[in-house]
Image (spheres, rainbow, N blue to C red):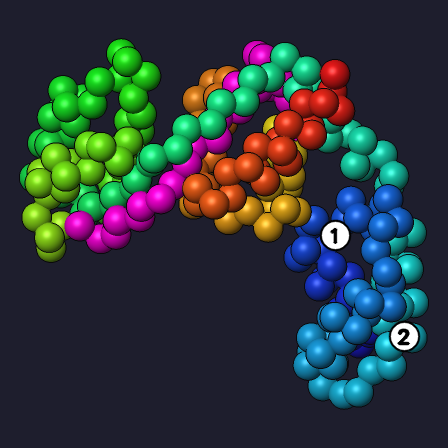
Amino acid sequence: MVTVSHVVTRILEDMPFLEEALVRDIINYAYLAEMIKPQVEQEMRKHVKRAAIVMAIRRFRETLRSGSVDALHVDFKESDITVRSGIFEITVVKDRNTIEHMQKLYDMVDVQKGDLLTITQGLYEITILSNSKYKPEIQKLFAKDQTLRVIDGLSSLMVKVSIEAADAVGLLYMLVKALSWNNINIVEVVSTLTEEIFIIKEDDTAVAFNAVKGLVKESR
């Protein structure tokens, strides 16, 4: 038999950012109960009292280990944060013609002077990130029917961490959480061994920088 407790537990487990908030007791149970009440009633197919949902939330909270949050500790004290504006993104169909143009991109973009060029290949698409000044030249390489999407007005937020931090469990989670809790929309994520590069809207740059800077300050 499906109970309110079972339904609430499943809903909360699908909302991973809530786990830490519940462990740290920074969630208003009554407000959370009211927020998930429609979903609970839909799955239960009947009216459910808010008090019953609050009780189920409290029981779920008791099952969480306080150490589950602290276990995800990443040392950011040796990290550097670099922001670049004036970035654009273009996604094209992956076929023989577009693949042949990839070498032209490396000849076109002056990475030695610090210009940005990242190329991510999926099974059917290729996404290219570079400085906006190269946009006209890059777009000329691809036919209109090969171009799936172009996004302007982007910035890159690069977090360079130590080798130890790069191997730590929860590195990407901690960074994404810091940005998400500040309502930052992450357009793309590009990773290397010790670099996590987040592509965001230029309007979000200042807030995103301060959010990640807070993680570095806590480690220091």
In percent of the image, x 69 and y 50: which residue is there? Answer: 16
Q: In the image shown, does 32 or 80 lie closer to the viewer?
A: 80
Q: Position of residue 52 (x, y in %)?
A: 90, 74
Q: Which mark is residue 165?
A: none
Query: Relative to 173, is 169 above or below?
Result: above
Q: Quadrant of the N terminus?
A: bottom right
Q: Is residue 177 visible?
A: yes
In percent of the image, x 68 and y 15: which residue is there? Answer: 77
In percent of the image, x 48 and y 31: which residue is there? Answer: 157
The amino acid type, in three-letter code, at marker 1 is: Leu
Dot 2 falls on a residue whose secondary structure is helix
Q: Quadrant of the C terminus?
A: top right
On whether residue 17 falls in the magenta region, the answer is no
Give the residue pinned by disc 1. 18
Q: Which residues are magenta?
A: 147-170
Quadrant in which residue 53 is drawn? bottom right
